[in-house]
Image: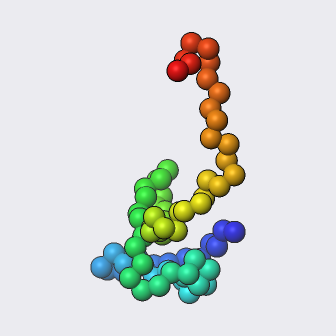
Amino acid sequence: MIDMSTVTLSPKFQVVIPRAVRERLQLRPGAKLMVVEFNGGLRLLPLKPPSALRGIARGIDPAVSREPDRAL
């Protein structure tokens, strides 16, 4: 879902993330966000602790097909 909320950059270069977005992403005061410059724009990505990533690859087949000249 894309939310086209508009924010204003303050004189201190701060922005306020709209309440609806904060609630959907469950952002809390003190949350860390990574700022990524991408195609002339900015993206704010919430940083997650490593424990939150546990199991994200569950069900993926780890077998890798190799070309004959690359066999181990």
Picture quarter containing residue 33?
A: bottom left
On screen, residue 31 above or below 48: below
Q: Is residue 44 visible?
A: no
| Residue 40 percent coordinates (x, y) | 46, 53
| Residue 10 percent coordinates (x, y) | 37, 80
Task: Kindly identify the residue that appears in the image at 69 percent across and 52 percent down.
Answer: 59
State the residue in front, 66 or 22.
66
For this orientation, the residue located farthest to the front is 72
For this orientation, the residue located farthest to the top is 69
Q: Locate residue 58 relative to residue 44 in the image: left or right.
A: right
Picture quarter containing residue 4?
A: bottom right
State the residue in front, 21 or 59.
59
| Residue 64 percent coordinates (x, y) | 62, 32
State the residue in front, 35 or 14.
35
On screen, residue 9 above or below 50: below
Task: Kindly identify the residue that appears in the image at 65 percent across and 55 percent down.
Answer: 58
